[in-house]
Amino acid sequence: MTSVALGVFTVSVPYLHKPKGRHTWFYRRAVPASVKEHYSQPHILKSLRTTDEVEAAKLCLKLNQQYEEEFERLKRGQPKELAQATYDLAVDKLNSFGLYPNVTSDESAYANITDDFLDHMSDKLKQSLSKHEFEQIWYHGKPIPEGLLDVVDKAALDLMQGKYRPRASAYADSYVHLLNRQDDKRFILSVNRAIKCLLEVLPDKPPGDYTRVEVRKLIKCHMDKGDVKTATLHRQMTVLRAMFNKVSKEHEIKEDRLHPFTDFDVPNLRDDAIERADFTKEELDILRQKIAARKPHIAFLIHLMLETGLRVNECCGLRVGDISIDEEVASVKVEKNPFRPLKTKSSQRYIPLVGVALEVMKDAIADRDRTDWVFPAYIDEASKALRTPQHLQRQTSAYDQYWAKMLRPVIASGTLLIHDYAT
């Protein structure tokens, strides 16, 4: 792990590496043993093509997130990259034969099209099977051996025969695509974590094939291991329920709409939550002194959250028009905009600006470079997206557990093991 100096702070960045005698930074990490078979080398070594350590740190963190997602997909037996959902590819396959859902109203023509598709599939099976094996499958309903057809052909044939029932792990891609959230890395990560939580205990099978006994076993195993808090476990179970509900409904998989995840109980929910104390006045004073030595826009941002309790994205996505400085009561208007949604509907509100918060906002507006945004460093105009700074990655207020955990080391030693630049 390499430490990068940023003013009075030291940022620890995992997998950032500079080979001896080289000026360019690299991303370097060992491939996890569980997925080594998918890589030609036991280590990943990738040039970040920069000599600037701060820029290298940003690129390293972004690249590591991509590889983490890749490893998770491979562990579930899926492709390295998030591809189009298998269901959509299977529908495209059927459409290429004029089938499903673009069927013709002419029954004789439809029969001919169906025959063309079935002939195509039977030819594929005959290439890999003996005559007896083929007849057992084609005429007597024996299941097709795993891996004999590629996943798209198998899904297309199952759709055609009304037998399409993907396993739980295949629901993840379909869920992401149905909600059109392919670019939402945090959402994809939450879905992947939920699937991982399931498959660590139970076999991978269609949701409707699980039983209530298995659902209770899943919850009990994770609670006995103590690997997650009860609130986290409840959240992952909720993601599984939403995923199975949405995909089975949209893909009309009747057998799986009655899955047993519709109702569950996590015993002693949130009893294991650890409440951390709020910052004392003395601690906040120390923080303010240390923050003063940082880059101006970062100092403005953190001061604003410390003084108002605004969430990270709420601050990063502020427009100049959201700030009322010259009114009788200066305030910040928090509302949804194209670059930043709000966490809840009730998050739309007015926050008074007084004392340090008011002075900071005056300085922040004066410091901006002729844009409509208070913190333009975190606004991506091209993609209409918000680049949340890594050091404040969660949508959280200044006084919750995350801040208490991450900022107290600053008070103690001046060492900040979090990242304070936009990605």
Image: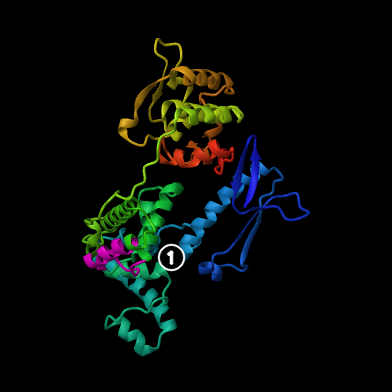
User: Which residue is depicted at the point 55% across and 71% down?
Assistant: 37
Give the camera-side residue of 160 and 415. Answer: 415
User: Which residue is depicted at the point 72% across and 45% down?
Assistant: 51
Q: Position of residue 11 (x, y in %)?
A: 60, 43
Give the camera-side residue of 14 and 274. Answer: 274
Residue 36, above or below 269: below
Residue 165, above or below 339: below
Specify start and end residues of the magenta stretch as a single range. Answer: 201-222
Colour pattern:
rainbow
> What is the three-letter code of the residue carrying label 1?
Arg
Give the camera-side residue of 35 and 283. Answer: 283
Dividing the picture into quarters, in which one does residue 353 lie? top left
Task: Based on the picture, tell me whether residue 215 belongs to the magenta stretch.
Answer: yes
> Could you tell me which quadrant the C terminus lies in?
top right
Q: Position of residue 3 (x, y in %)?
A: 64, 46
Report the side of 323 relative to 103 (left or right): right
The residue tagged 1 is: 76
Question: Furthest-right residue in view?
Answer: 21
Residue 109 visible in the current orientation: no
User: Which residue is depicted at the point 40% across and 83% down?
Assistant: 126
Residue 120, above or below 173: below
- Is the stretch drawn in magenta largely helix, strand or loop? helix
Report the side of 286 relative to 146 (left or right): right
Q: Position of residue 348 (x, y in %)?
A: 34, 28
Label 1 residue SS: loop
Task: Based on the picture, tell me whether residue 229 belongs to the magenta stretch.
Answer: no
User: Which residue is depicted at the point 39% across and 13% down?
Assistant: 329
Report the side of 347 relative to 362 (left or right): left
Neighbour class for label 1 at 10 Å: few (<14), some, many (≥20)?
some
